[in-house]
Image (spheres, helix red, strand yellow):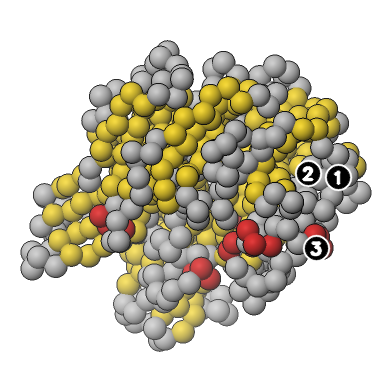
Amino acid sequence: MELRILSVIALVVFFGGKTLAQEPDFLFEHPYPYPVPDDFMFTGAYLGEMPYTTSLEMGSGEGYLIAMSASINANLMETDTVARPPVVYKVSLEGNVVGELTLGQEGRFAFIYRLFDDPDDSRCCLAVGFIHDNDLHYNRILMSKFDYDLNLLWQEEVEMPEPHRRYIGYPNFIDHSGRILFSGVDSDNGFYGYPKYALISTNGEVETVMEYPHLVDVYLSQSVAFEYNDGSGDFGFVVTEIDEDPLHDSIFLCRMNSDLELVGRRFIPSISDFNAYQYNMVLLSLSYVTNCFSLSDGSVALIGDGYLSRENYQHEWDHNPVVGFFKLNQDGDIIAYASYGQGDFGYPNDSIKVSQATGDMVGDDNLYITYSLGQPNGTGIDYTNCFVVVRLDSEGNVIWKRYWDKYYPVYGKKVYWPYYATATKDEGCLLTGFCYHSEQADPEIFMLKFFADGSLSVPEMETFVRPYAFYPNPAQSELHLSYSPDVQPARIELYDLQGRLLQTQTQGLESIGLEGLAAGQYLMKVTLKDGKSFTDKVVKE
């Protein structure tokens, strides 16, 4: 979707208002996905037309706010029939919808990017996004304020001054002085060009606008701006200089002061390891940064899509997509790094088809990240049939890792796409996103709440969260297992589909041999030392 987001300060008539959901029949009841209501049905499983979600934990501790917007092609925004308004749902701690609020204006397309706590009112929040002007053919920033009872207090359209009105519009964060930092790209396609930034007050007043025309041909990732946690009041942002070969993209961490003046720019190089198991060289690089976090010691953590490039002793290179983690000190030097997903040092783990990592910071510099996974064979988004939730320490070490791969036969959904991760006050993590199956055109929204130890908010659903990955599946002779660092396996059992025990293994539980089995389907039961067990279907080729 294009980021050409613009605006004028003007009070608009909002469409709809506070209503109570009679039955939570489509959304959020426990961690099951529920069908999207009729107004949000889409034709075709095209990712650009999937619903977008963002979330916020209410400061009162009574639940969560989830905003859902329709995501459509830019050239359809001026069609009244697709002018679906965004909706904010109030969700209880138990996962039940207890209220809803429709934002925007009737007959115009609107979109909510972020929900923020209102720094001036502890029982209110701000919804920030854009609304499309059908007469002027561009977008304006849309800001709405409402309380926790979903009473709309005001709603405004904010117009950026020329020549910036077509390009600035993505809200990144609220700084220590209560201003929202907005970003955008000066480009006809809204993605590749040079970056622009603006500071706008929480009541819609444009304070400062700055552009950086010397940073040309860059991709400006959303959600990658932050405020330094060193008392300086400076901001940081990341840009990617595009190369025809994504392996040669260049990542830069930039620093600007509170007036949005550029005061520093640092190139983020690849990390090399010359003694990496059977490889002559291993290079870990970032190609697209999706999140930046300023840690308590003034260092910065970068998380995003990357590549693990490995050269064997025949000087042949293999490039695998991974989620990368880089930690930089105050001078911009890399002091810690890690990778997650296929190509982890030493063994192939998850097969990433679409990583799209997102995350949030919690507690003592711990981080949550989530990313989508797929099967090792085949192409296309239908192979991203689960996602991973990982809690990291400030050095990038995995504290725990959970795989959400439950297939819902009732809805026939198998592709999971987590959009937003919100760290909660109990040091847990709230995830929202959508899932679907390619044979069904209507996507469905899901919400999952994890506690700090990786358990789910609904105990009876915990068996669906596997603390391990297994691969390949189908397998010819051997099946490998990779466990979360916080679990200890006790035994692995293989059964036929009639429930007959075929073999048991209590040692060397990182793999299990299948040589003596006939081709077909089997059940693998993994039992942990804490007594929990998980059963998966595996295929012997």
Q: Earlier in the sequence, mark 1 or mark 2?
A: 1
Left or right: where does residue 312 sit relative to residue 158? left
> Marks 1 and 3, how far apart in space?
15 Å
Q: Residue placed at 80% from the left, 63% from the top?
A: 81
**SS at mark 2?**
loop
User: For the residue marked with disc 1, what is the amino acid?
Assistant: Phe
Task: Name the residue at 44% across, 55% down.
Answer: 355
Where is residue 25? Give x, y as percent.
83, 56
The amino acid beneath tag 3 is: Thr
Judging by the rendered image, the residue that carries numbered circle 3 is: 81
**Residue that carries the numbered disc 2 in the rendered image:** 104
Determine the residue located farthest toward the bottom in the rendered image: 518
Please determine whether, in this image, residue 375 is positioned above or below residue 63.
below
Q: Which mark is residue 15?
A: 1
Q: Which mark is residue 240?
A: none
Marks 3/2: CA–CA distance: 15 Å
